[in-house]
Image (cartoon, grey):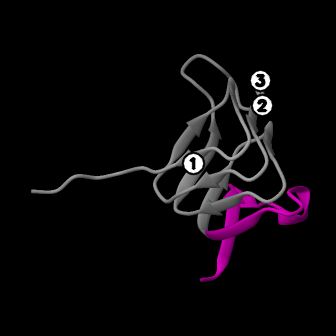
Amino acid sequence: MEEFVRKGVNVDTSSYPGVKFSGEVTIYPGVTIGAGSVVNGPCILGLPPRGRAEGELPLVIGAGAVIRAFAVLYTGSTIGDRFVYLALQLRR
């Protein structure tokens, strides 16, 4: 799968050493991702909550985290090491 990380324009993935990206990942300013993490797109990291500006609050994701497709993680959060986020969709 081709790596595609963006926030309007392409984001330099070297800003996130030791993090494996796949799929389309949107990263807003103020996001820190710990080494050994895996981020599978499509997903959005660091979306500011209503009434806050981009980069005003941080989003900190610990080392060894697994963020799966369709995740939306807002700023103003700190997530510990080895966190696993699965966005599930139930169908009938």
- Work out whether residue 28 or residue 80 is closer to the camera in this orientation and state it: 80
Stretch in magenta: 1-22
- Circles 2 and 3 in contact, beta carbons < 8 Å: yes
Q: Which amino acid does label 2 sit on?
A: Gly
Q: In which quarter of the image is the C terminus?
A: bottom left
Give left or right: position of 87 versus 36.
Answer: left
The residue at the point 69 percent across, 67 percent down is: 21
Provide residue 68's location: percent of width, then percent of height: 53, 58
Can you identify the residue that label 2 sits on? Answer: 55
Q: From what the image shows, is residue 33 above or below residue 55?
A: below
Amino acid under label 3? Glu
Magenta-drawn stretch contains 6: yes
Q: Distance between the residues labelled 2 and 1?
A: 24 Å
Counting residues from the start of the chain, the first of labels 1 and 3 encountered is 3
- In this rendering, the label closer to the viewer, 1 or 3: 1
Q: Residue 84 carries which label?
A: 1
Precedes in sequence: disc 2 or disc 1: 2
Q: Which residue lies furthest to the left in this view?
A: 92
Residue 36: quadrant of the picture: bottom right
Count of numbered circles in the view: 3
